[in-house]
Image: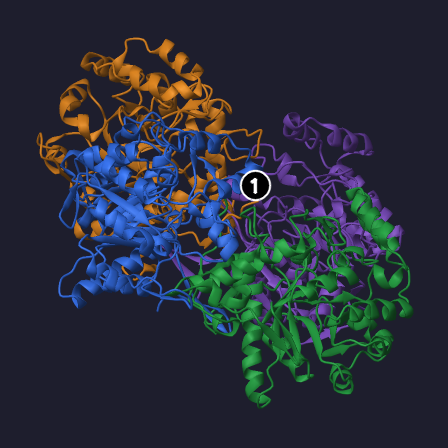
Chain colours: A blue, B orange, C green, D purple
């Protein structure tokens, strides 16, 4: 392959690219932003905007999942978060936002030791359904067997299985691990699963029958994962690889189109633009939505890695509050840092480069041009 | 193409270079700076220096356009700026320079809501003509249809159409968009148009009959455009690509030489040198001239993106005041940071590398050597 | 060779990679961390974890060598350090930790002028043996002839010869230099020797009969070595090159497997993961263990270069105290910076990428993706 | 050529490397530093160390030129500096060291307006000769015709012509420019000339009959030259290119060996090592010697660009005082930052990589491994 590199005589590696390494370029045609469509459809569900709220406590509560649904996107509730461990987690959210940095990890480890309660799973999902929006909840692969029956019974439109790295073939010597293929086949509900970050891993997930594959590490703490685990899959390459798996699987399966959902590295509107340019069908947003006034994290953002009982790999990050959910998505923007009017920016970028829908925009020209330090 | 890179299995991109990535190198001959010519001619107009003042409120007022003309260059007035919205904008300039950073974007959005007045367009252009220098005014593509008749009637020698990205083929579903080819054909005045940043986009603009093409994004807020829209076209590659379009169009058209005008990334004299080295015929300067004592921005610099009503993408930037317009262009320099004696530096660089005019200097040798951080 | 680069017309060089330049990537399979083995065996000695404590005063005392042995690894005592120069060095450790930065180099030069005493070598090694762990001590190549008889007589299970750069062929015009091949052949004890950083240097060391080769510069002050001596061998390339030498020597020797031990650039758990990914069999840790509460350096770390009598090339570095030795190795971690639960991180990284033992993990996929500044 | 890069469709450039981009690597052999020779010979003159003091006021006075000669190197006096403009410049040196940064450029422009006096040229050179060391003085190409007769009459062993960029073919329309070839042919004294930074420029200088070619820009303000003039020739590539010209000219001339003298980018001992690794025969040191207690700059360093009357391109830089000239050259070092014991570091680096003289060391292996920011 053309971008294989010799690390040393005993090892080769592949050059991989992050969103920061690339940019899209205009072509010979421009369009009026008004004629650009941002619509997205997965299975029977149609969305006005290709935005999925990440199942993380700092991003999605029942209320913000409903708000995002009403705004045209899809909210996904983390069914292993505070909302299914505590009847009323409000005070805990407030406490987390106020913790001293040095106490945060250990106190969060403590708070998340409280068991998950099936009756709370049911109650939270019903609350969302009652609002009339598409209902989606997420479990980790480790807990899917334990709680999925409750989830299905409570009723979800889309089922999300999200972990740092989810594979179609998990080897364990203890309890029988989740057989994804059988699980998805048996389930009546379309499943979105990930993170995956390579062509092979994604192709195998597509073969399990998943409706969509999350590309990334299911957390957002990419830098920390690199520091602690040495694992890293730069997003531009990962999305492009998984988009190639989608195309090959489409042929192999005789026409099943599995959606590629970028999940990570999407902090600014420019990153979102690049995810679609690399082949994404939709995006899952964490930090970008944690900046909303309505976000439960109150200016802070964290993923499940931040409170892992023995190997914490993320941190509670201060992301600030940049506007209402509506302002973050649709503007008007009052700053120029790529945190507000995310959809306006995507629409304008597509218009400037001459594209009218997201599927077409996957073909936009890209340049490689790493940011310069200083 | 030799610099195509595989981003991932589903996407290829091209390595592109900024001015910071490159430098010119001496060859075996040197010259005396005194025998170097900086002259430039477009259509019937001759200039002693290849410098065009960017049509931005912080750079060009009627007075500074006249001063730049007297200095041997070409000043272009923004016909959608404060000078055509307000009878006397002096107080507003002062206010903008004094705004608190957090209020700047919204207050500027407010100030620029005032409508453009045709009688002021006429008055400003006549003021410049009365001074005996070459007269040039700029409109955005969106407003060209609305105001061009006024402009032509008032009388301009060169007509500039400048936007972030201007294409020969703009698709819209509302009002008929500007048909550039017909417009330029009908007009009696030579037209300079842009920004364009790729070979194809520039070639199509050349085919509309333009006398010159602006290379860049028509703003100067390149970093912000990258962050918010994910769009970026590193200038060294862009200028070189458009210079190749000039050469190919020269052949295709049987001899029409369309001028390539670098417009962006030209903050220091070294950048200016590199623009010509990559193939530019002339340069449009924004920030570099906003540093003049005479500049209307009073030490600040901003483009139309900074006050976009719904998607602001630039900011009012503090550039400081580094000397008179004459000192910035011709020295003597009293600092060594590349902000003064811009023409002296260009002249010396051409002499050191052995070239005697700008057209020849387009052939100078280049090295790729990215700046090191720290 | 594919990664040869022309520096200029008169010189070619090879692109080399540091651990920071690379990362490992998941594949299509994942495993349960519980089924992952971290065991390592060299000669007749088996270890539960592939960790060797670096023979540096700030890392290994007789007590911490014993503690690391009890934790499943191998402690190596520096037989030219304070413990063999002074009967009771406790006060000196305290003094070093308290020195003003500007006085450190000269005071340390003074402290280390005290001669090495053979009777203290004997006493320190016996203390370690009495604790029932594997006994290992290190000498520099310059002092090996002078002290090895004492070391062998005192009894060691593994003999370590460690210097900045150790070669199989040392040219001198004075006293006969150490003939490594003869020395190792005559010795009854398996020898680990280094640093080596290239294929050729390592291959020659393997041919001397060494049981293991240290890859690196035997110090940890890589940046200083680069600044002062202009010498640098980025670790990812160095480990991979030496791993290739292991494979070629295995064939050449008809089956002798010489262990590749990464020694340098291993400050975070992610670096440790990458060392194995590049082909290491084990790791020698300096700074990473100097952060233990039990470490003699009391939050500071230094190597022999720091007190070189005429060309000091390292410095006493403040590394802080991040937890007990046990917490650093096995967690639980209370921070997410890659300094604690080093073995847990290695285990999880292997599990996430689908490998069950260290030898297999040497085949894991790698990407090249340099860290971005800022 | 293998490292040609397409900047854009209309321009190609060559990837060039700085000393920071590269490092030397050990091979399979090591040597005792004591058996390493640093000797250098040019024409009939032998030196114990390959060090030339740069003809800059902050580095070389008559006294320091003598001191460097006594230390085994070659001091070159700037014959256009303060020592030939003023009878007693001591007070001016003191004043320059005390100037406020904002006044420095203009005050230095003023100080250097004082004319050069032939009788002072004579007096200074005689003072050096009286001390019994090799005598060398430098003029710029612009002033060579005016003053060389005085210089030759006063008596020099080596004549240095040093400018930012010196070419064998200078084009001027005014006074006849210096005909280097004729000048050198007529002169009885060996000439060292530069800066040159490319193969072609250096080859032409070699053909003029020069005994040595300076590689670099004759100033040390490389970063400023890049910012202001857009000119840059990274030193590793430049030295390697000029070394290739030396080899080709050796063949073309039937055996004339022209010395390659690196002049720039040599701030730390590691840089010096790399200059020889790229093919240099000797080094000209500016900032590195300006750090001596004896240096006339009293902790400051500047070149002629800093006081150019109309286009100042360098600055008075604070370099500090790091030890006596002897300590800087031969140690003992008391810090580890590459500023002291420059010759000890070179010697040790050669020993560690297995070389015994400088000519051999030009063949040492190199890796390309850019410094990482942060």
Residue B11 can be seen in this image: no
Residue name at image x 54 percent, y 59 percent: C344
Image position, residue C258 (x, y; %): 62, 80
Q: How crowded is mark 1: few (under 14 residues within 10 Å), some or many (20 or more)?
A: many
Q: Residue D304: tell me if it is visible.
A: yes
Q: Is residue D40 left or right of residue A58?
A: right
Nearer to us in this view, B265 or C28: C28
| Secondary structure state at the residue bearing disc 1 | helix
Please determine whether, in this image, residue D120 is positioned above or below residue B292: below
Please state which of residues C84 and B198 is positioned toward the viewer in this rendering: C84
Residue A327: image x %, image y %? 29, 28
**Can you give x and y, in whole percent of width and height, for residue C233 in the image?**
60, 64
Give the left or right position of residue C303, taking residue B224 as reference: right
Q: Residue at x 19, y 30 (%)?
A: B141
Quadrant assignment for the N terminus of chain D: bottom left
Q: Is residue B166 above or below residue D52?
A: above
Q: Which of C94 and A140 is in front in this view?
A: A140
User: How many discs mark residues in the rendered view?
Assistant: 1
Left or right of D210: which side holds C3?
Answer: left
Q: Which of the 4 image quarters holds residue B36? A: top left
Chain for mark 1? D
Residue farthest along the bottom direction in this orientation:
C254
Residue behind mark 1: D224
Residue B108: x, y in percent? Answer: 33, 18
In the rendered view, tell whether residue D80 sits above or below residue C10.
above
């Amino acid at each position: 392959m053309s971008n294989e590199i010799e690390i040393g005589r005993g090892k080769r590696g592949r050059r991989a690219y992050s969103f920061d390494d690339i940019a899209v370029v205009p072509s010979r045609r421009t369009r009026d932003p008004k004629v650009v469509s941002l619509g997205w459809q997965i299975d029977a569900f149609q969305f006005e905007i290709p935005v999925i709220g990440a199942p993380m406590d700092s991003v999605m509560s029942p209320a913000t999942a409903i708000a995002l649904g009403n705004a045209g996107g899809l909210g996904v509730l983390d069914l292993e978060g505070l909302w299914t461990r505590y009847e009323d987690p409000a005070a805990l959210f407030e406490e987390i936002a106020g913790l001293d940095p040095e106490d945060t990890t250990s106190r969060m480890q403590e708070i998340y030791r409280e068991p998950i309660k099936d009756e709370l799973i049911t109650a939270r999902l019903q609350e969302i359904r009652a609002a009339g929006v598409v209902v989606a909840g997420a479990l980790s692969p480790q807990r899917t067997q334990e709680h999925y029956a409750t989830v299905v019974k409570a009723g979800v439109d889309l089922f999300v299985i999200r972990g740092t790295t989810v594979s179609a073939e998990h080897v364990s010597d203890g309890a029988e691990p989740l057989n994804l293929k059988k699980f998805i086949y048996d389930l009546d509900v379309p499943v979105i699963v990930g993170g995956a970050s390579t062509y092979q891993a994604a192709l195998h997930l597509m073969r399990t029958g998943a409706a969509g594959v999350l590309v990334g590490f299911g957390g957002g703490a990419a830098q920390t994962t690199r520091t602690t685990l040495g694992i890293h899959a730069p997003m531009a390459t990962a999305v492009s690889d998984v988009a190639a798996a989608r195309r090959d699987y489409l042929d192999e399966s005789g026409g099943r189109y599995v959606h590629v959902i970028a999940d990570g590295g999407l902090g600014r509107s420019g990153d979102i633009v690049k995810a679609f340019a690399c082949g994404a069908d939709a995006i899952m947003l964490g930090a970008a939505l944690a900046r909303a006034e309505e976000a439960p994290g109150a200016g802070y953002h964290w993923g499940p890695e931040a409170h892992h009982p023995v190997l914490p790999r993320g941190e509670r990050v201060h992301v600030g509050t940049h506007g209402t959910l509506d302002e973050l998505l649709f503007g008007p923007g009052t700053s120029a840092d790529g945190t507000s009017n995310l959809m306006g920016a995507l629409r304008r970028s597509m218009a400037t480069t001459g594209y009218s829908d997201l599927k077409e925009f996957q073909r936009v020209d890209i340049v490689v041009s790493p940011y310069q330090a200083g």
